[in-house]
Image (spheres, grey):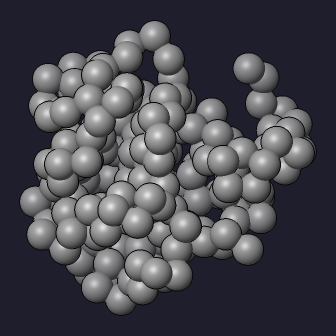
Amino acid sequence: MKKVAVIFADGFEEIEGVSIVDVLRRGGVEAHIVGLDKLPITGAHGVKFVCDMTLYDLEEGDYDMLVLPGGYTGVTNLSGNLKMRETIKKFDKKGKFVAAICAAPIALGVAEIMRGEYTCYPSCEASIEGGTYVSDKNVVQSGNIITSKGPATAMEFALELVKILNGEQVYSEVKNGLLFVK
């Protein structure tokens, strides 16, 4: 079974974080909610989350993918955390998947791994170093880096992650079960 660490930092966008974890689990992925530096974590809209562990407990070698939800305050917290930057670099160096939505591609730029095409929440591209911004796609994959625009694209993004990890058949089953039309 594939394993994914979804990092929740105070101020993250709840729709993105919860949608990603839910869809991955529906797709047969062992998705862990990882608090950046403490427990519990409070989302951008005041919802508190109990996480499975903190980033400091994460055994990176056990995971196939790292996912960063957006939310500007959450991304500021992700980008400012040295352990987070090191973890992003380790996943990338090993060729593991690194996925980010909304403002979270900023953290990939801060970690100096952004290359190729990417997308993000409109206007955040001005804060991202590296890569080439694409405005007309909801989800962009460039090698091992997957990015998406924001809250309204969270379901599409999560489904793409399922497809990358568990293939077209599982993707189609989950997509159809969710009544997702695209």
User: Is residue 6 visible in this depiction of the protein?
Assistant: no
Q: Quarter of the image holding residue 56?
A: bottom left
> Residue 108: x and y, percent?
26, 47
The tally of labels here is 0
Left or right of 50: which side holds 116?
Answer: left
Query: Residue at point 19% right, 43% down?
Result: 109
> Residue 15: x and y, percent?
49, 45
> Residue 68: x and y, percent?
38, 53
Query: Residue at point 48% right, 68% down?
Result: 5
Q: Is residue 119 above or below residue 55?
A: above
Nearer to the camera, 89 or 149: 89
Left or right of 106: which side holds 163?
Answer: right
Q: Quarter of the image holding residue 79?
A: bottom left
User: Is residue 158 visible in this depiction of the protein?
Assistant: yes
Query: Residue at point 41% right, 73% down?
Result: 34
Nearer to the camera, 70 or 83: 83
Q: Quarter of the image holding residue 3?
A: bottom right
Q: Is residue 106 above or below residue 52?
A: above
Nearer to the camera, 39 or 142: 142
Query: Residue at point 49% right, 29% down?
Result: 140
Q: Quadrant of the C terminus?
A: top right
> Residue 165: x and y, percent?
67, 55
Which residue, as the protein is rendered here, is positioned at the far top? 136
Q: Is residue 115 above or below residue 181?
A: below
Q: Quadrant of the N terminus?
A: bottom right
Q: Is residue 115 above or below residue 112?
A: above
